[in-house]
Amino acid sequence: MKHRGRHRRRRQGKALRAFLAGTALALTAAATMISASQATVTGDPGALKPLASADTDALRLTAHPLAPSSLDRLSAAMGAPVGVDTVLGDARHTLRDAADCTAAERETLPVSPTATAAYCWKTEDTAGWRPGAVTTSGDADHDGRWGRHRVVLSAWSRGGGPAADRGLARVAFVDAGDPDRLAYTWALLAVPVDGGRDYRGLVSHVSGMVWYEDKLLVTADDGDRAALYVYDVNRIQRATVTGDAVGRVPGGWSAHGYRYVLPAVATYRLADGAGAPRPTALSLDRSTAPDSLVAAEWTRDDGDRGARLWRYAFDTRGTGLLADDGTGRVEATEAYSTKLTGVRGVLAYRDAWYLTRAAGPGDAHGTLWRQDTEGARPAVCAADDVRDCWSGRTESLSYAEATGEVWTQSDRVLFSLPLASVDRAAE
């Protein structure tokens, strides 16, 4: 039986790759029809420019840990925290595989480089919610697993609906151990208040997210003005009341209808001031020593100012936190400026920085650039050097070094592809 199951998965894997390849061929054919004017929408940003030390002061973070007594008070009231294993045990929703995605969903996939795995979210589960960042157990641990699980975390924020719900942020915990069946469940991101006697929902679009060791770092760029919020995946709490409310309610604790809630344990804040950036894209770089958190700032798509790119070192003591100077101050260890505007996703590995831009008005696809201190190259498709080849909107790139895969998501499609294919597309 085990051998038959293994052969079945191999056949399904081959069928999926053939299906995605056919989709990519169709999209590539369409891409060759893009006019020469569209092929040069984005000019060559050239090489990265290192920032002087005086220009990195605005990148300094200050850590603000939540008092342990507040977290202990919340746990005492809600019950003992649970971990990722428990949450994945409740993963009863399933993603649709590529063959079951609609034509409109498949059109959001990149033309080049092509996805090697793709999954679509259920419409009823995501209606009214805006997709955000992705991180995986490949970030959390160097072997690519959290315990025995391969896990993908996908962030979403509430768009429309009642005013009280707008901006709420949630994370899907996806069990990705079986590539033929990705199952998931939701946890609401929250912020303890009143000394841990209650909590409120995090109000922000989560465009950047990195899971490192037992900590989850997410960007906050809308209603909550901290640069980064920090969560502990070993401190997930169970909600005890089902309802739309968030926090303490008569009879127990509510998490907007979800079974789990993740309370923040700390924040990292940037200094106020005109020069302070707002980090909106994050990723992990395991090619540095120590491992580092990579960040990029948001700039206007149609503006004339490029983005700043920088990194912070992680603490080497196994805390999952950033390395500070002993007083909570975290300095950028490397910083550059790029002429590229409208950066949405960022990834750094070895000497290369990979940057994505969203699709322009009327365009179906965005662009992906490979940039370093010597120059820049876009990922191109077809024989016409067309640059609009990437997914139209992906806000994060997460590289799992153990498998060589990059994970990200478009509006409704979660997908992965080898980093090596990105390099080939940009050669």
Image (cartoon, grey):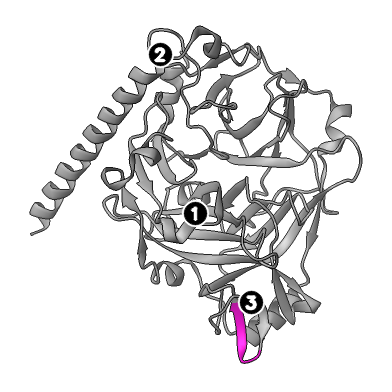
Crowd rating for badge 3 (residues with CA inside 10 Å; few <14, some 14–19, many 20+) = some
Give, as a three-letter code, the residue at label 2. Answer: Met
Q: CA distance from mark 2 to mark 1?
A: 36 Å
- The residue pinned by badge 1 equals 153
First of labels 3, 1 by sequence position: 1
Residue annotated with mark 3: 245
- Label ID, residue 239: none
In the rendered image of this protein, does residue 387 appear above or below residue 279?
above
> Mark 2 highlights which residue?
33
Task: From the image, state whether disc 2 or disc 1 is nearer to you.
Answer: 2
What span is colored magenta in the figure? 250-254
- CA separation, marks 3 and 1? 24 Å
> Which residue: 52% across, 52% down?
140
Residue 291 appears anywhere in the view: no
Please tell me whether mark 3 sits on a helix, a strand or a loop: loop
Circle 3: residue type: Ala
Q: Is residue 79 visible?
A: yes
